[in-house]
Amino acid sequence: MTSDEPVTGPAYRLSTPRLLIRCPDPLDAPELDLAIRQNLDHLLPWLLWAKDEPVSFEKRIEFLQHTRGEFDLGINFGYLIFNRAETILIGGAGLNTRLGQGVREIGYWIHKDHINVGYATEAAAALTKVAFEVDHVNRVEIHCNPLNTRSASIPRKLGFIHEVTLHNRDKDIHGNLRDTMVWTLFEENYPTSPAAKIVIQAYDVIGRGIL
């Protein structure tokens, strides 16, 4: 690689004013396993995957291997959220690709011991910035349960538009149909959104700066 060749994504590692957000590693299994077990009651009302928890430690390792593999292949982009010193696991997030080319869907969860201090908003802002400025997508969406008012406040703070509430399009952990709010930020609106103003550093797979 010559010095004038641009460094491109995906962004494996991000730092924000308070957080370190990075691609997972199987070595994270002990911390992630403990965090999920500590937060099951906190996560179960909102996240469908929590109904299958707790899983065995070996399954936890396999999940992290799978997540890292998808990241390396550019299929999907799951992250873990830490404090800046990378000593405390604060939660998880994702720039998910299930909505198709040119779109990212942001998901997030925060450890119950670290809620109500703006970490989810900070992480979502950083991932929004990466989606538009590194991945160069056309739009970013956040989907949430209308009853989850804490989650719904995050896209609102970041300048996303509440486009629609879809009736009975998802299921809760009991298999009952539930509504889903769809929040969207379009490329043309991103430059004036609060998400564009967050200061982050982003790095590729070998630590070269992207943003």
Image (cartoon, rainbow, N blue to C red):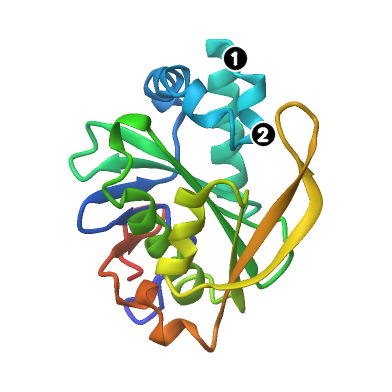
Left or right for 17, reference 168: left
| Residue at image coords 57%, 13% | 58
User: Which three-letter amino acid code belongs to the residue tagged 2?
Assistant: Leu
SS category of the residue bearing label 2: helix
Residue 129 position by quadrant: bottom left
Reading the image, the residue beneath label 1 is: 55
As drawn, 13 above or below 58: below
User: Which three-letter amino acid code belongs to the residue tagged 1?
Assistant: Val
Q: Is residue 9 visible?
A: no
Residue 143 position by quadrant: bottom right
Residue 124 position by quadrant: bottom left
Percent from the top left, x then y, of residue 44? Answer: 58, 28
Q: CA distance from mark 1 to mark 2?
A: 14 Å
Which mark's residue is nearer the viewer, 1 or 2? Answer: 2
Left or right for 161, reference 109: right
| Residue at image coords 51%, 72% | 160
As drawn, 173 above or below 150: above
| Residue at image coords 26%, 47% | 117
Alpha-carbon neighbours of circle 1 within 10 Å: few (<14), some, or many (≥20)? few
How many numbered marks are there?
A: 2
As drawn, 162 above or below 91: below
Instruction: Work out whether mark 1 precedes mark 2 in sequence or the reverse, and give the earlier one.
Output: 2
Reading the image, the residue beneath label 2 is: 48
